[in-house]
Structures are given as structure tokens and as C-alpha cells.
Amino acid sequence: MNDAIEKRVGENLRKLRIRAGLTQELLSAKLQLEGCDITRSALAKIEVGQRHLYTDELILLKKILNASYDEILE
């Protein structure tokens, strides 16, 4: 994926996480409870565009953050 796109998606996820009132630690814990093996550190890297977002993570983030794919991927 293009670096600029990954950074934009990461920024969108950060905004959505904050809107939901979640810390990175809480969000990673919620993802783990849903069966997604992700750490707070990995989530932080996604938010700054340093790590790819996998499809299973995207699906669960949409659900947990109560967001649309458009809000995440715009």
C-alpha cells in the first residue's frame, strides 16, 4: 500500500479511536478479546502508518469503533 494512504488510514483510525473514548491499550484489548492478536505497540504503528492493516483487523476495528469502511479508508 502507498505510504501516504497508510498514514491517512492511520490518522482516521486514531480519530475514530479517540471519538470512541478508547486508549490504544483499551482498543488493543478489545481486539484481542475478539480473537485478533495485536499489541498496543502494533496499533500505535498502524496509527502512524508504519505497519500494514490486515483485513481481519479492519473488520474488527470497524465493529469496535462503530465506524463505516468509508470513515476508516477515506
Image: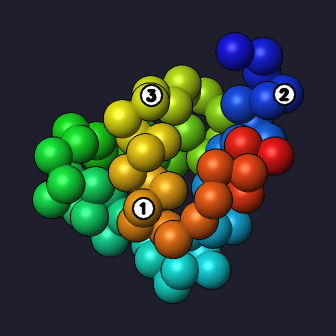
The part of the image, by quadrant, that contains residue 8 is: top right
The percent coordinates of residue 56 (x first, y second) are 36, 35
Mark 2, other Cα within 10 Å: few <14 / some 14–19 / many ≥20: few
Q: Name the residue under label 3.
A: 54
Q: Are marks 1 and 2 in contact (CB under 8 Å)?
A: no
- Spatial distance from mark 1 to mark 3, Cα to Cα? 15 Å
Which is more foreground, mark 1 or mark 3? Answer: 1
Residue at 21% across, 39% down: 37
The percent coordinates of residue 74 (x first, y second) are 81, 46
Residue 63: which disc? 1
Which is more foreground, mark 1 or mark 2? Answer: 1
- Spatial distance from mark 1 to mark 2, Cα to Cα? 24 Å
Residue at 48% across, 42% down: 58
- Spatial distance from mark 2 to mark 3, Cα to Cα? 17 Å
Residue at 50% across, 56% down: 62
Q: Nearer the viewer, residue 57 or 63?
A: 63
| Side of 52 relative to 28 (left or right) | right
Secondary structure beneath disc 2?
Answer: helix
Q: What residue type is labelled 1?
A: Lys
Q: Are marks 2 and 3 in contact (CB under 8 Å)?
A: no
The outermost residue toward the top is 1
Residue 30 higher or lower than 58, as above or below: below
Q: Do the residues labelled 1 and 3 touch (CB within 8 Å)?
A: no
Residue 55 higher or lower than 2, as above or below: below
The number of numbered discs placed on residues in the rendered structure image is 3
Q: Which amino acid does label 3 sit on?
A: Tyr
Q: Which amino acid does label 2 sit on?
A: Ala
| Side of 8 relative to 54 (left or right) | right
Q: Mark 2 points at which residue?
A: 4
User: Which numbered disc, 2 or 3, marks the residue that appears first in the sequence?
Assistant: 2
Q: Nearer the viewer, residue 25 or 74?
A: 74
